[in-house]
Image (spheres, rainbow, N blue to C red):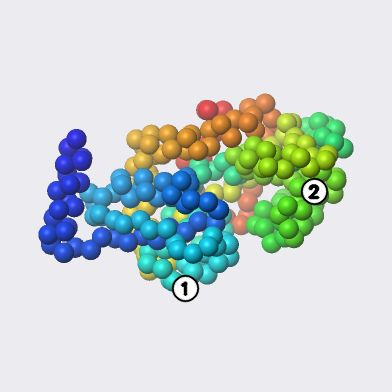
Amino acid sequence: MKKLIALLVLTLCCQSQGIAKTVVTFATGIQGDAKQQYEYNLVKLALDNTVEDYGVYQLNVRPGETPSYTRMRVEAEEKQFQNYLYKDSVSNDLLDKLAAVHFPVELGVAGYRVGLISPEAQNKLRTVQTKEQASALKIIQGRGWLDGDILRSQGFRVVEGSHIEGLFYMAANNRGDMFPLGAHELKREWDKFKHIDGLRYDTEICIYYPLPKFFFTHPDNKLLAERIQVGLERAHKTGELNALWKEYFYERFQFSNLKQRRIFKFTNPMISRVDPHYEQYILDPNTL
């Protein structure tokens, strides 16, 4: 109640003194109503948790059709919208160009990779018992994906496809040993593509490498990045962030059943310059 009163007083003061709201433009590469998506509500949660420190805000959704990640990077670099904020996979290269909020948006679940496979690969994966055997697998990836570079650096063979839907057919037709997805993505994609003849999903192994996804903005928006960082850390401490995460991801994450899989851990050289502070927020599947 006290927090609500303080918020109302602050809002009235800002209005009476002519202080402008902080306008934030949220962009997403996910189709559908952005305001129903996890990332939008996470940004809103961070902003709500910092009103007393940074003032009132207005959270807008980027207008127009859903952009590609390449488009969003360009828009952030060129500062095309006011206080532009979007989520992206972290890399050393991206950190050189944009200001990052050093907090793993999805609590690191994308780093747990589980695979769509063919019946032939299903038998093969049952025999994979060591990290060395895992790295001998041929992995299906989209052309230009960051994951392909990460996997090659760890000794995996990678076969690429240019169209996303074609990757599912490649997996079903045994063009590679597995097409990995984030553990929170498997159920959604399986439900969408299980009609493909021969497509299966593996239940035996999980390939893990750090694949944090941060919010990014233009380097001039340092105050915004700071505010989102503070807000996310506060929401994590109070448990609000974990509650939001469970609302969107818990059921899908449990479908991947990581506790029953052999998890093989690899490194990600593409984030060698990232401050390891974020690692404390990475989810441990054994705690769910």
Answer left or right for 27 relative to 261. Answer: left
Answer left or right for 229 relative to 74. Answer: left
- The residue wearing badge 2 is 169
Answer left or right for 222 relative to 64. Answer: left
Answer left or right for 218 relative to 144. Answer: left
**72 vs 258, nearest the viewer:** 72
Query: Which mark is in front, 1 or 2?
Result: 2
Task: Sort mark 2 into few (<14), some (14-19) or many (20+) by Cα contacts within 10 Å.
Answer: many
Whether residue 186 is visible here, answered yes or no, is no
Q: Picture coordinates of residue 179 (x, y %)? A: 74, 46
Could you tell me which quadrant the N terminus lies in? top left
Residue extending farthest right = 120
- The residue wearing badge 1 is 78
Alpha carbon separation for disc pair 1 and 2: 37 Å
* Quadrant housing residue 240: top left
Q: Picture coordinates of residue 27 (x, y %)? A: 47, 59
Tell me: residue 64, above or below residue 228.
Answer: below
Tell me: residue 32, above or below residue 62.
Answer: above
Residue extending farthest bottom = 78
- Amino acid carrying label 1: it is Glu
Whether residue 4 is visible here, answered yes or no, is yes
Tell me: residue 159, above or below residue 235.
Answer: below
Residue at the spot x=17%, y=51% of the render? 10
- Amino acid carrying label 2: it is Tyr
Q: Earlier in the sequence, mark 1 or mark 2?
A: 1
